[in-house]
Amino acid sequence: METTKERWCEAEIYRIAGETVIKSSDAAKAEPYLTRALAVACAQQAKSWELRAAMSLARLWRDQGRTQQARELLAPVYEWFTEGFDTQDRRRCWRSWRLSAEKTMKFMVTFTGKAAHFKDAVSRFLKTGAAPPEGVKMLGRWHGPFTGWVLAETDDLRKVYEWTTQWSDLLEFTVVPVLEDAELGEVLSKLA
């Protein structure tokens, strides 16, 4: 590269160097190579190299327990592509993105008020806000007459049950695991 001044594959060379370091020694030493690969690909607007560099860096971060960073890195790169959905790199990116989140699931929690305890439920809600426990992320909450819905995400279903149990004296609950359209599409495509 230095001799020929050819730079079109510079990002891929840094990425491969990072992957080589991961396989042969301390994986933490690979991060500078991978971040350099990503920076070069971005500067060159080389989206395929950017996708590959992002996947390698995200995989490293995931293996280091930095799953949220891995997801945040992959999501915009993955979503940038408007075609080529069936390319091997894009499919790998989707799998990497899903793997970085495989421990979390979404749950639709439906709650129904017990008529005899309506005032008590309202009073407790106004005092506490019915915030979820640590480890449960509330993605949304909607209310209807004597009923409501919460979309929650967690890696520990026991936390959802801990949350609902705190209210079981006043409300009845149904907890159902749910998938987004893209996740369901992935499952259905395997059946086709």
Image (cartoon, rainbow, N blue to C red):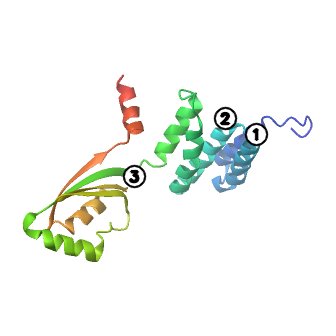
* Precedes in sequence: disc 1 or disc 2: 1
> For numbered disc 1, what is the local secondary structure?
helix
Characterize the local packing of mark 2: few (<14), some (14-19) or many (20 or more) Cα atoms within 10 angstroms: some
Task: Calculate the distance from the C-alpha at mark 1 to the C-alpha at mark 2.
Answer: 13 Å
Q: Residue at x 51, y 38 (%)?
A: 94
Q: Quadrant of the N terminus?
A: top right
Q: Give me the C-alpha separation between circle 3 and circle 1.
A: 34 Å
> Which residue does the image show at 64% across and 52% down from the upper left?
27
| Residue receiving disc 2 | 48
Residue located beneath label 3 in the image: 104
Q: Amino acid at mark 2?
A: Ser
Q: Earlier in the sequence, mark 3 or mark 1?
A: 1
The circle on residue 13 is 1
User: Dot 1: few (<14), some (14–19), or many (≥20) neighbours within 10 Å?
Assistant: some
Residue 69, position as x, y percentages in the image: 56, 55
Q: Residue furthest bottom?
A: 127
